[in-house]
Amino acid sequence: MGMEEKELAEALKAVEEELNLAKRVYLAFPFLFWAAVLPLLYLLTLILNSYAGISWDWASSILSILVVAWFIVENERVFKKVEAIERVLGMKREKKKAYLVAQISAWIISALVASLAYTSEGEWMLAFVGLALLLMAAVDFVFVKRAEWEVLLGGLIILSSISLVGKLPLPRLALAVMVISMAFAFVAFLYIRKAMRE
């Protein structure tokens, strides 16, 4: 009986470790996704505008809608993986509407503040995303009691790059895309690195 209990404890520990890894991957996934897709979105918009004669606003709008839809589908798959492991462990995830509303509000507030502060597309994008990450970290701290210092660091990196817009030999929007992509990749790396060490 002692051996059976030991084997059961080891199996439970292995499942918990898998759950922890899955959760970290779930947290890293949005950053990893946008780090890869954002430059591609910019490049495709540039190609459609330059070679197909499609207006920049129309091309970016259509591609953005498609990419956001793709992200929602992929993110849901990752979330279901985490939920499946939680069910095995008998854990029940409480879905708080206030938490979701706070997350959405963080992005809306960031967009409004960025619009008031900047007119340049590149500076607006950096301010919007950077401030949103700071607010998202605050929302997680308040609702989940979890300090997401990785997200906070990503937001600070993006916001500190606003001063570079117009000073480097790069189009403003291209610089913003590059900075956000690199910052998101770095945040994803920190999440995965943490998961592998735990």
Image (tube, helix red, strand yellow):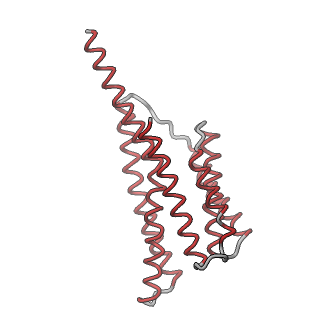
Q: Position of residue 162 (x, y in %)?
A: 67, 67
Q: In the rendered image, which quarter contains the N terminus?
A: top left
Residue 176, compared with residue 2, is above or below; it is below
- Relative placement, left or right, of 1 versus 135 is left
Could you tell me which residue is drawn at 57 percent across and 50 percent down?
151
On-image quarter of the C terminus: top left
Q: In front here: 94 or 46?
A: 46
Q: Is residue 152 above or below residue 183?
A: above
The residue located at (38%, 33%) in the rendering is 17
Q: Quadrant of residue 90?
A: top left
Residue 20 coordinates in the image, percent (x, y): 42, 36
Measuring from the top left, give residue 49's x and y in whole percent: 47, 86
Residue at 61% across, 76% down: 172
**Residue reaching furthest to the right:** 117
| Number of numbered markers | 0
User: In the rendered image, which quarter is residue 85 located in?
Assistant: top left
Residue 74, horizontal then vertical, whole percent: 38, 56
